Amino acid sequence: MSIRVMLVDDQVLLRTGFRMVLAAQPDMEVVAEAGDGVEALEVLRGTDVDVVLMDVRMPKLDGVETTRRICSQAGAPKVLILTTFDLDEYAFSGLKAGASGFMLKDVPPAELLAAIRSVHSGDAVVAPSTTRRLLDRFSPMLPSTGRESRAADSGIDRLTDREREVMLLVAQGLSNGEIAARLVLSEATVKTHVGRILTKLDLRDRVQVVVLAYETGLVRAGGGAL
């Protein structure tokens, strides 16, 4: 079954280029397009989509708010943010809004295709270290007050000591393999812990784990645990 992709970008030429790349893949098809967020939300009401490639700077309704509205719905498609500049504050906001990752618009076609497949399979497409670097830069945008109550409301207190330990290492940019080596566990065990963390905290992927860790103050700018 093909991965159903929607292209959301106000640049027609860019959408055309992406469509040509995706059309050449046997496991993908572009089922919808939109030139702004308002149009995207309208189209999604009547179209089954698996992955949305979302521009951030668009007229009428930007990609961040569009992503937030999409991801708030049950059974929503995964959203992959496309940004022109690395460490764009829009990418930061997009991750907070529920996107499964972000990529630069000039990404090589092979990397874009791999990202779409990863997002579709439920993985995040941003390396944890890249996400951490993004959050380190924009963490001052997060309010410093009320973090204790947000931590409690998020359900972090429901985690076991080991799960909390794994969460902190995920937030500091370590891969499952690196976490396994640090804690002297098997990689399969670490993967199980990460899965339980996502379930208990009602998060979509490990990118959202990193964002939550920063928002609640579990990790400070620079990647250190508090």
Image (spheres, rainbow, N blue to C red):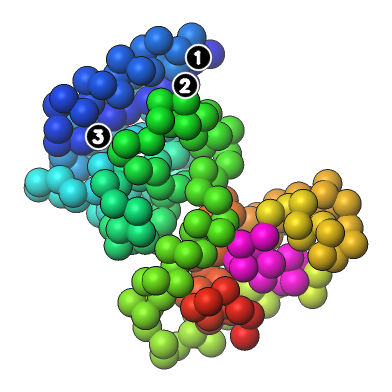
In which image quadrant can residue 92 be found?
bottom left
Quadrant (top left, top right, bottom left, bottom right) of the C terminus: bottom right
Under mark 1, the amino acid is Asp
Residue 8 location (% of width, % of height): 24, 34
Residue farthest left in this picture: 60
Q: Give SS at disc 1.
A: loop
Residue 182 location (% of width, % of height): 82, 65
Which residue does the numbered mark 2 point to in the structure image? 3
Q: Give SS at disc 3.
A: strand
Q: Give SS at disc 2.
A: strand
- Label number found at residue 8: 3
Residue 42 location (% of width, % of height): 20, 34
Q: Determine whether label 1 and label 3 are within 8 Å by CB.
A: no
Spatial separation of the CA atoms under disc 2 and disc 1: 6 Å
Name the residue nearer the viewer: 152 or 165. 165
Is 165 a magenta residue? yes
Which residue does the numbered mark 1 point to in the structure image? 27
Under mark 2, the amino acid is Ile
> From the viewer's perspective, is 15 left or right of 189?
left
In which image quadrant can residue 140 be found?
bottom left
